[in-house]
Image: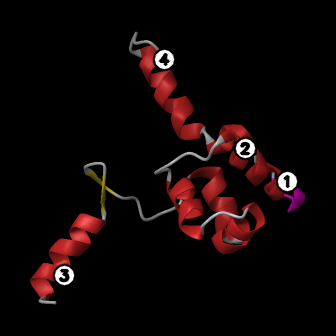
Amino acid sequence: MPAALHLIRMATVERHRGRPRSRSWIGKFGEWLERYGAARLAGDLEVDVTLVGRWARGDYQPSIQKAIGVVVVARAAGADLGLEDLYAKDFERIRTRIRNGQPPL
C-alpha cells in the first residue's frame, strides 16, 4: 500500500463519529484500569478487550450490568470505584444541559 494511502486510511480509522478518537484513558476508571489491566478486566467480565478500551476512553458507556461487574471487580481488587465514575461523562453532559436551560435528556 502506498504511504499516502496508508496515512489516509489511518486518519479514517482514527475518526469516530466525526471527531478524532481519544487515545488516552480518562477519569478514575481509566486510572484504575491502567493498573489493573484491560485484558484482565475483559477476561473477568467475558467481553472483548477492545470494548473495555472504548469504555476507558469514553467512546462508549458499559451497560448497567457490565458497569456493576466492573465495580464489583474493582472493589474486590481494593479500588474505590463506583458507578458514578463509569458514567461521569454522561453526568457532566446532563448537568451542562440543565445549566443551559435544556431538558436533561
75 and 66: which one is in front? 66
Residue wearing tag 4: 104
Give the Cα distance between marks 1 and 3. 43 Å
Say whether disc 4 or disc 3 marks the residue closer to the N-terminus: 3
Compared across the picture, whether 24 is left or right of 36 comes to left
**Which percent across, then down, holds residue 17?**
30, 48
Compared across the picture, whether 21 is left or right of 37 comes to left
Give the Cα distance between marks 3 and 2. 39 Å
Mark 1 vs mark 2: in front? 2
Say whether disc 1 or disc 4 marks the residue closer to the N-terminus: 1
Circle 4: residue type: Pro
Give the Cα distance between marks 4 and 3. 42 Å
30 and 46: which one is in front? 46
In terms of image quadrants, where is residue 52? Answer: bottom right
Q: Residue at x 25, y 73 (%)?
A: 10
Q: Residue at x 50, y 24 (%)?
A: 94
Residue wearing tag 2: 65
Q: Residue at x 40, y 59 (%)?
A: 22
Say whether disc 1 or disc 2 marks the residue closer to the N-terminus: 2
Mark 3 vs mark 2: in front? 2
Residue wearing tag 1: 75
Q: Which label number is shown at residue 6?
A: 3
In terms of image quadrants, where is residue 39? Answer: bottom right
